Image (cartoon, rainbow, N blue to C red):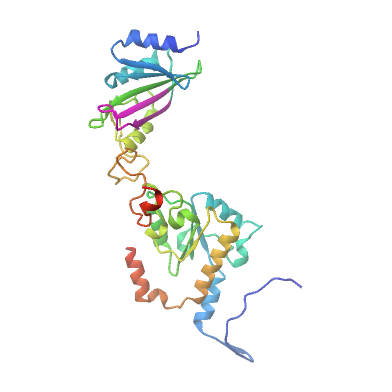
Amino acid sequence: MSDMKLVEAPEGIQGEGFFATSLNKVIGMARANSMWPLPFATSCCGIEFMATMGSDYDLARFGSERMSFSPRQADLLMVMGTIAKKMGPVLRQVYEQMAEPRWVIAVGACASSGGIFDTYSVLQGIDKIIPVDVYVPGCPPRPEQIIDGVMRIQDLVRDESLRRRHSPEYKQLLASYGIV
Amino acid sequence: MALNNDIVLSRLQEKFPDAIREAYINFDQLNIEIDPAHNAAILRFLKEDEEMNFNYLTDLTAVHMPDQAGKEIGVIYHLHNLYDNYRLRLKAWLPASEPVISTASSIWLGANWMERETYDFFGVRFDGHPDLRRILNVDHMEIFPLLKQYPLEDSSRDDKDDRFFGR
């Protein structure tokens, strides 16, 4: 008997030959367990991410087997490392190219706040240019922390209303970053 | 015969009696302060003279010393004669109001990007450079960030309280 753990079905009403639940829950479950991350790795946090993807920590256990190196097929933008101000427009363009729904995780102190690089040439946190869902602290964070960050993203994805991306609040959030 | 400090200094003084301002040993290396108006001629001599033969430009950069009135900005050349493994440091001081000096990019092609970097960070204008524009910083930057009058820290931070940094 394998000790493999499968995702449990969402709450619902079950009977002979049918199972009824809300569309939100089914889609949330499917999305949360098949995230396609786009790694945007610029420095040492990216090395920790490589360990996270490797066989020891194996992010694929959480449904993120496939790294998407095209933003157009990615769900989760993982920003790992120092983002220089010159890199800012590139990161923003990558974010804009991602299709909705999209999530962003800032891995490490530099991506979250600029970290030790409080200097004129470094962006003081990527949330200056794109909205961020989860911040992972650490310099660099261990793979366990990155996995925890991805699991927090999964929680967000699982519970997200299907209408959230159409809501005025969300549109206002994007507008506050100047993203249409 | 291998190069040494005495040979280099005496050859330079003989060839450019008016352009050699000062010479001293610093960190076991000969430093020569030169007249910025003659930098190109001196550098070309150092590279092309058969005895000098400084075939490698290790580095070209600048320093900003705001307290030295009239010679605030120093352009620094690190030269290397790879045949004799002999190194030499040249300095040319410029006023901050008019930091202009002749390019070395026609002498060593490698000076091209080094001069762009020096322009990018210190605002030194290299006369005769084929393409003098920013190389590392964002194109729309309006300052030369390594000049001491500009703060090193990012100006967009509002969470740093000076009281906690002892100032």
Over which residues does the magenta segment extend? B58-78
- Quadrant assignment, res A16: bottom right
Q: Position of residue A68 (x, y in %)?
A: 52, 60
Is B131 rendered above or below residue A23? above
Is B33 rendered above or below residue A4? above
Q: Position of residue A91 (x, y in %)?
A: 41, 55
| Residue furthest bottom in the image | A16
Queried whether the magenta region covers residue B76, the answer comes back as yes
Q: Residue at x 49, y 80 (%)?
A: A24
- Quadrant assignment, res B35: top left
What number of labels is visible? 0
- Quadrant assignment, res B7: top left
Q: Position of residue B47 (x, y in %)?
A: 40, 17
Q: Position of residue A115 (x, y in %)?
A: 46, 52
Q: Residue at x 60, y 80 (%)?
A: A9
| Residue B50 seen | no
Judge by depth and name the residue closer to the eye, B165 or A129: B165
Q: Main secondary structure of the magenta part?
A: strand
Queried whether the magenta region covers residue B115, the answer comes back as no
Is A80 rendered above or below residue A63? above
Q: Residue at x 56, y 60 (%)?
A: A146
Q: Residue at x 52, y 77 (%)?
A: A27
In the picture, measured across the screen, residue B35 lies left or right of residue B53, that is left
In the picture, measured across the screen, residue B46 lies left or right of residue A141, that is left
